[in-house]
Image (tube, rainbow, N blue to C red):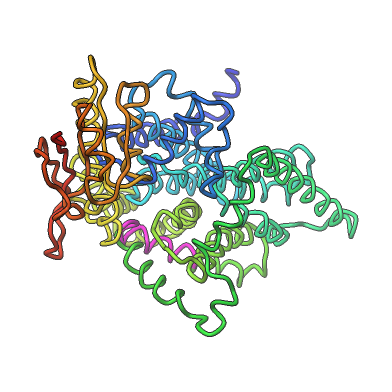
């Protein structure tokens, strides 16, 4: 052990520094940002799955895979705040992504690239934002980066143990989110890095090892058949993805609109210095391929580029709804390439300054760190893309004040039953409230953007409240007293500012 530490002391030191920076930018004020609709759903699912073993496959009912929720369940035993538990799971997943970036960059390029790629992952606002949310995308990114690492390793070593580990990672990605299936189709691209030293026999062995990995992944995927709603995984696809037949007459729609979205997201969420480093990394890999005729690290770099771009392009071509988090599994791979771009730019900077590393840090750090500071202290003030700001801070999907409302309801329900009506039956309301009232004397009645007759009937015999969004409830509230209002972020396009409202419904 001592000899190992001495031998790898530089890597351990670099990783320790990166890990410290990672947690400094992920843990503070982790519950400051309002809960998002999908976060509320995932956390509520995990609570129900924990309480009722027969519902361990509950996410299948909505066409989702359950690994993220399974992993969340043990955290509830140690962490009282369910939102904190869910977001900590993403923080842990992001840390494994960081370690994967380091080892992948070191394997394909060198230690210097590993440091820069790791640093970029630590500071990039794109990763800071989503690593701090209880969403499945951070876990999918962690599986993806390690899949690429072991896939490249397998192509160079042809080892059964590596193939088996790769299979478990592929299966984990699929159980996290169905787009993880794309990794199975991209896997054969690693043949670009295959060194055929034994004729057709070694190629056959590589194909067999791929088969072993894919077989393990499919065995893991078919475990979902134990759930009663396995068929929903495929039936819900049409809700999110255009079929090729639908796009025959308009092949560039939604590709062009989604391209415009990316043109807005990447400069803001990656920041321009990191985006330019990515472009330089791609150009240097292309130049290396041209110079070396597909030899050396440039080929593995090409595999990383393709593994990042192929899912990105497929999402642009086929997704009905398109948000920045759907691309998150590609971002760590892009940052590996950006780290390589930084290392290739450093010698050029030496002509202008004696300290090229210091100059590069001055160029790279200010914009991302300022963005990160806002995410940690005043997230609604961060310069997010328009659609992301609307979804996470302005619209009905943003659950402002729900933990405070839950505390209020818990206090009122100490010695009597309390009924709560909510605007909506799935998502921010009621799930965002239910996660805090899991084992309480509070019962829920769902409604639309009005206080329904069922809620008014409950008010005759019980202390009854109603929670909804201000912009949705206009004209839909009567015979009720406003108890509390929680304003949401103010829109930048002069639309009415929304708020979460708590009413007491009168008998």
| Percent of width and height locating residue 493 | 15, 65
The reply to whether the magenta stretch includes residue 279 is: yes
Which residues lie in the magenta part? 269-282
Residue 384 at x, y percent in the picture = 26, 56
Up/down of 136 relative to 329, above or below: above
Observer-nearest residue: 447 or 426?
Answer: 447
Q: Which sits in the foreground, 484 or 250?
A: 484
For this orientation, the residue located farthest to the top is 415
Q: Position of residue 242 (x, y in %)?
A: 53, 69
Residue 232: in magenta span: no
Magenta: main secondary structure: helix
One can see residue 343 in this view? no
* Viewer-nearest residue: 34 or 316: 34
* Residue at 58% in and 37% down: 57
Residue 296 visible in the current orientation: yes
Residue 167, by quadrant, is top right
Left or right side of 48 for 228: right
Of 282 and 150, the residue lying toward us: 150
Please state if 308 lies on the left or on the right of 274 as rendered.
Answer: right
Which residue corresponds to the image point at 46% horizontal and 66% vertical from the top-left?
320
Classify residue 369 as left or right of residue 19. left
């Amino acid at each position: 052990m001592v000899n190992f530490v001495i031998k790898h002391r530089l890597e351990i030191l670099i990783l320790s520094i990166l890990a410290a920076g990672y947690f400094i930018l992920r843990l503070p004020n982790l519950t400051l940002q309002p809960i998002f609709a999908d976060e509320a759903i995932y956390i509520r699912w995990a609570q129900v799955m924990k309480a009722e073993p027969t519902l361990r496959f509950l996410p299948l009912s909505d066409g989702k895979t359950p690994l993220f929720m399974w992993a969340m369940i043990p955290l509830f035993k140690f962490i009282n705040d369910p939102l904190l538990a869910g977001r900590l799971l993403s923080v842990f997943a992001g840390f494994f992504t960081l370690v994967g970036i380091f080892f992948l960059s070191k394997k394909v390029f060198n230690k210097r690239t590993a440091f820069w790629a790791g640093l970029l992952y630590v500071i990039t606002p794109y990763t800071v934002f989503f690593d701090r949310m209880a969403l499945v995308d951070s876990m999918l990114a962690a599986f993806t980066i390690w899949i690429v690492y072991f896939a490249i390793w397998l192509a160079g070593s042809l080892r059964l143990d590596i193939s088996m580990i790769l299979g478990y990672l592929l299966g984990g990605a699929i159980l996290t989110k169905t787009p993880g299936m794309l990794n199975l189709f991209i896997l054969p691209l690693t043949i670009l890095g295959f060194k055929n030293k034994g004729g057709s026999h070694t190629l056959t062995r590589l194909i067999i090892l791929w088969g072993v990995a894919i077989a393990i992944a499919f065995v893991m995927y078919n475990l979902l058949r134990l759930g009663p709603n396995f068929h929903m995984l495929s039936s819900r696809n049409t809700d999110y993805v255009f079929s090729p037949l639908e796009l025959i007459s308009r092949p560039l729609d939604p590709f062009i609109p989604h391209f415009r979205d990316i043109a807005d997201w990447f400069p803001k969420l990656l920041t321009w210095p990191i985006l330019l480093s990515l472009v330089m990394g791609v150009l240097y890999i292309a130049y290396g391929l041209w110079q070396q005729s597909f030899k050396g690290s440039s080929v593995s770099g090409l595999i990383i580029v393709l593994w990042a771009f192929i899912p990105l392009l497929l999402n642009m071509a086929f997704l009905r709804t398109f948000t920045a988090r759907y691309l998150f599994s590609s971002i760590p791979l892009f940052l590996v390439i950006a780290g390589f771009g930084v290392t290739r730019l450093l010698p050029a900077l030496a002509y202008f300054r004696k300290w090229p590393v210091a100059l590069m840090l001055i160029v790279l750090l200010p914009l991302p760190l300022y963005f990160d500071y806002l995410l940690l202290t005043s997230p609604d003030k961060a310069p997010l893309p328009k659609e992301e700001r609307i979804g996470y801070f302005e619209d009905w999907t943003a659950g402002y004040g729900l933990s405070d409302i839950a505390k209020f309801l818990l206090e009122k329900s100490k010695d009597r039953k309390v009924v709560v009506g909510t605007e909506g039956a799935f998502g921010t309301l009621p799930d965002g409230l239910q996660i805090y009232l899991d084992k309480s004397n509070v019962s829920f009645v769902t409604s639309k953007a009005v206080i329904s007759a069922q809620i008014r009937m409950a008010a005759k015999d019980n202390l009854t409240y109603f929670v909804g969004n201000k912009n949705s409830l206009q004209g839909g509230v009567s015979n009720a007293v406003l108890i509390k209002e929680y304003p949401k972020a103010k829109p930048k396009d002069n639309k009415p500012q929304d708020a979460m409202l708590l009413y007491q419904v009168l008998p």
